[in-house]
Amino acid sequence: MRTLQGKTLFITGASRGIGLAIALRAARDGANVAIAAKTTEPHPKLPGTLYTAAEEIQKAGGRPLPCVVDIRYEDQVHAAVEKTVQTFGGIDILVNNASAIHLSGTVETPMKKWDLMHGINARGTFLCSQACIPHLRKAKNPHILNNSPPPSTDPRWFAPHVAYSMAKFGMSFCALAMAEEFRDEGIAVNTLWPKTIIATAAVQNLLGGDDTVRGSRTPEIMADAAHAILTRPSREFTGRFCVDEDVLRAEGVTDFSKYATVPGAELIPDFFL
């Protein structure tokens, strides 16, 4: 039985959505979870805060550590990593989940949005990895998992929203490089991406609302796939660009109906696949 019991995870953007689902799956094993997120006060369009997430993690059986972090800032990231190490004795797993999205063409993209997406997605992933790697080197089965797609040069994934695509693929290229850079040290670096749209606040607010949610799966499919990856031997599974459904099929899962937001609804493929 593969488990994350006793492991310490540092998860960015874990106050809601996919990040929280991954945290709760680890919590059910009895893991320690550092929640690195910005939301401290309720938001009218974004459910959950750092502290409600911590309560859910504790109820699920985990040990939460809420860390107020904007991953664009080095001092905040390093302070949160140090707090996690002081609290739990180390870090076994980093999940780079935090992301910003703004889907617009070249002329329509404000540079403020460009900076936000690149600061959180690509730079934030690099910064959090850089800060955690010294501690991952000491772990028994260290993993970094980025919530990003398999690399592609297909123009259809760039032309409609080049700024977002570059920022998101930046996370994937971090994994491509770091998997090889740290292969001999046994630090696994992989990515995970959903085959279908996942029902999150971003989908509700930015990608079509209720109609898109109907064709979505719940974040739990990403959580279960992440668990399968993070419990594999790090020296044997690295440098992979994983898709949630493929990961679970390899684990023997054949029925995915439990992940449907609306049973029987036609599923909508996610970007980049």
Image (cartoon, grey):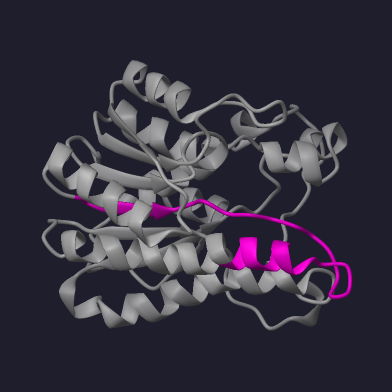
Residue pictured at 84% horizontal, 75% vertical: 106
Q: Position of residue 262 (x, y in %)?
A: 75, 27
Q: Position of residue 50 (x, y in %)?
A: 45, 30
Quadrant of the frame with the C terminus: bottom right
Question: In this view of the protein, can residue 27 be seen by the observer?
Answer: yes
Query: Looking at this view, is 273 or 252 the one in front?
Result: 273
Query: Looking at this view, is 172 or 83 the one in front?
Result: 83
Question: In this view of the protein, can residue 272 be seen by the observer?
Answer: no
Residue pictured at 71% horizontal, 63% vertical: 112
The answer to whether 73 appears left or right of 4 in the picture is: right
Query: Looking at this view, is 209 or 115 the one in front?
Result: 115
The answer to whether 170 appears left or right of 190 in the picture is: right
Q: Is residue 18 magenta?
A: no
Looking at the rendered structure, the number of numbered marks drawn on it comes to 0
Q: Position of residue 159 (x, y in %)?
A: 83, 76
Q: Is residue 109 magenta?
A: yes
Q: Position of residue 8 (x, y in %)?
A: 23, 43
Q: Which residues are magenta?
A: 91-118
